[in-house]
Image (cartoon, coloured by chain):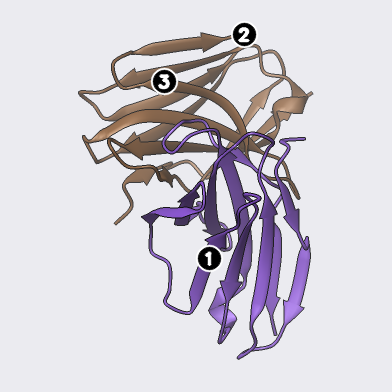
Chain colours: A purple, B brown
Amino acid sequence: DSGVTQTPKHLITATGQRVTLRCSPRSGDLSVYWYQQSLDQGLQFLIQYYNGEERAKGNILERFSAQQFPDLHSELNLSSLELGDSALYFCASSPGAGYQPQHFGDGTRLSIL
Amino acid sequence: DQQVKQNSPSLSVQEGRISILNCDYTNSMFDYFLWYKKYPAEGPTFLISISSIKDKNEDGRFTVFLNKSAKHLSLHIVPSQPGDSAVYFCAARVDSSYKLIFGSGTRLLVRP
């Protein structure tokens, strides 16, 4: 158990819809990272927050947004969903802004029908 | 542009033998490298890491080697155990950045 909690575990929705993925970091960790893993691919970095502020951005689509709340949990919002957004979405956390290693949750599997 | 490459999608070894997983990278600005292990339906689990100023790091049965001139990273598991069967990802961090760039993974099967 990494201590990083992601909900829900599975999400099935339709094209054009909007969903919210939630992540609670390990106790004491201030940084949260979001990654997308499409079928048989490596994890693609989406975005990082540190203590409520955005710190780094990867190839995150404009239809996607995220935030980190004062209690340090984070949400990833995906809107106008397309079939190609079907993937595993992982959240990771670490104590500091650039501190490694990152510890991962078990992911949310998003299926777009 | 795939900056971190794991060219072997799968590897099968006998229990007790050595498993060697390889990773190549192209960006000379990477300053920190990590290996993660992933079981089905679980998130990646951190295994071992190495800074770019070192060429070897050891932790129990796991050793990571870094050859900067060749831009090559390898993970050695000795002796291999059936419980080591999983997908292994190498990842790299760009100096002054916070994101990790992952390879596509190698599926290791350790046969009893």
Q: Nearer the viewer, residue A5 or B78?
A: A5
Q: Amino acid at mark 3?
A: Ile
**Residue B67: % across, % down:** 29, 20
Q: CA distance from mark 1 to mark 3?
A: 30 Å
Q: Residues within 10 Å of mark 2 (few under 14, many from 20)?
A: few
> Disc 3: which chain?
B
Q: Is residue B14 above or below residue A78?
A: above
Give the label, 1 or 3, closer to the camera: 1
Q: Which residue is mark 1?
A: A66
> Disc 1: which chain?
A
Which residue occupies 42% across, 77% down? A62
Q: Amino acid at mark 1?
A: Ala
Q: Nearer the viewer, residue B59 or A92?
A: A92
Give the label, 2 or 3, closer to the camera: 3
Residue lying farthest to the front in this orientation: A70
Q: Which residue is mark 2?
A: B60
